[in-house]
Image (tube, helix red, strand yellow):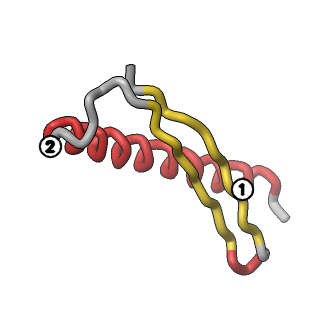
Amino acid sequence: MDEDLFNTSLRRFLKKVGITSQREIERAVRDALASGRLKGNEKLQARMVLTIGSLGLSHEVFDEIELG
């Protein structure tokens, strides 16, 4: 295995996940605020699931996102 290639590829994937996830969360929160479903002071329970089927990997991360 080429460690440098693996590391670069993994970092590129994680950067893409981070950027696209942040955009989707921001959009959903703005939409919910605009529609009145959120007031803006909530704590949102979040869960992210990472799966790689060929490795049998399933990893979950849980946390809160505070709005204010």
Q: Which sits in the foreground, 1 or 45?
A: 45
Percent x, y for residue 1?
85, 65
Asked where in the image residue 60 lies, by quadrant, the reply is bottom right
Task: Identify the residue under disc 1.
Answer: 5
Q: Residue furthest left?
A: 35
Whether residue 43 is situated above or below residue 49 in the rendered picture: above
Residue 35 — which label?
Answer: 2
Percent x, y for residue 17?
51, 51
Q: Which sits in the foreground, 4 or 46?
A: 46
Percent x, y for residue 10?
66, 53
Classify residue 31 as left or right of residue 15: left
Kindly identify the amino acid type of the residue bearing the numbered disc 2.
Answer: Ser
Whether residue 63 is situated above or below residue 12 in the rendered picture: above
Whether residue 12 is situated above or below residue 54 in the rendered picture: above
Q: Indicate which disc, 1 or 2, sits on the residue closer to the N terminus.
A: 1
Dot 1 falls on a residue whose secondary structure is helix
Kindly identify the amino acid type of the residue bearing the numbered disc 1.
Answer: Leu
Q: Which sits in the foreground, 24 or 31?
A: 31
